[in-house]
Image (cartoon, rainbow, N blue to C red):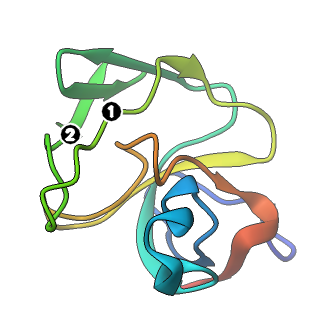
Amino acid sequence: MHGPQPLRRGDFIVFSFDGEAKARYPGLRGQPFFKMVRGLPGDVVTVQGRLVYVNGEPVGIAKTHAHDRHPLAPIDAMVIPAGHYYVQGTSPDSFDSRYRSSGLVRADQVLGVV
C-alpha cells in the first residue's frame, strides 16, 4: 500500500532501488527507478527458460547479460510475498523484476505513484 490507496496492477511507480545489483553497481543504491506494477502480493511468478510469467501471463524475456556483459539470472519462481511488487519497465532492455539482481520492490521503497 502506498498512500491512501493500495497499488494496483498497471500503476506506474517511482521507487528507490535496493536490489542485490547495488553491490556490483554502487551507483544504483537509492537510485530512483520508474516502472509499471505487473505483479501484486499473492500473484504467482513462474519462469520457463528465460520467459517470465505472472499468473500464467507472459510478462517478458529475461536477457542473458547486462550492458557490461555480466550474466543475468532470471527471477526465481515464487508467490509474491505481502508488501512486495513485481515491476517491469516499458523497454525489453529494462532492468526490472525479471532478474534476481534487481528483484521485487518492497512497499517501503515506493516513493510515489505517477
In-front residue for pair 86/70: 70
> In the picture shown, does residue 33 fall above or below 68?
below
Q: Are marks 1 and 2 in contact (CB under 8 Å)?
A: yes
Q: Residue at x 14, y 67 (%)?
A: 67
Q: Quadrant of residue 91?
A: bottom left
| x and y, in percent, of residue 114 in the image | 52, 86
Q: Quadrant of residue 108?
A: bottom right
Element under label 1? loop
Q: Earlier in the sequence, mark 1 or mark 2?
A: 2
In-front residue for pair 11/50: 50
Q: Amino acid at mark 2?
A: Ala
Asked if residue 63 lies left or right of residue 20, the reply is: left
Identify the residue position indicated by label 2 in the image: 62
| x and y, in percent, of residue 57 in the image | 28, 25
| x and y, in percent, of residue 17 in the image | 58, 72
Identify the residue position indicated by label 1 in the image: 74
Q: Please tell me how crowded label 2 is: few (under 14), some (14-19), or many (20+) other residues with Cα within 10 Å.
A: many
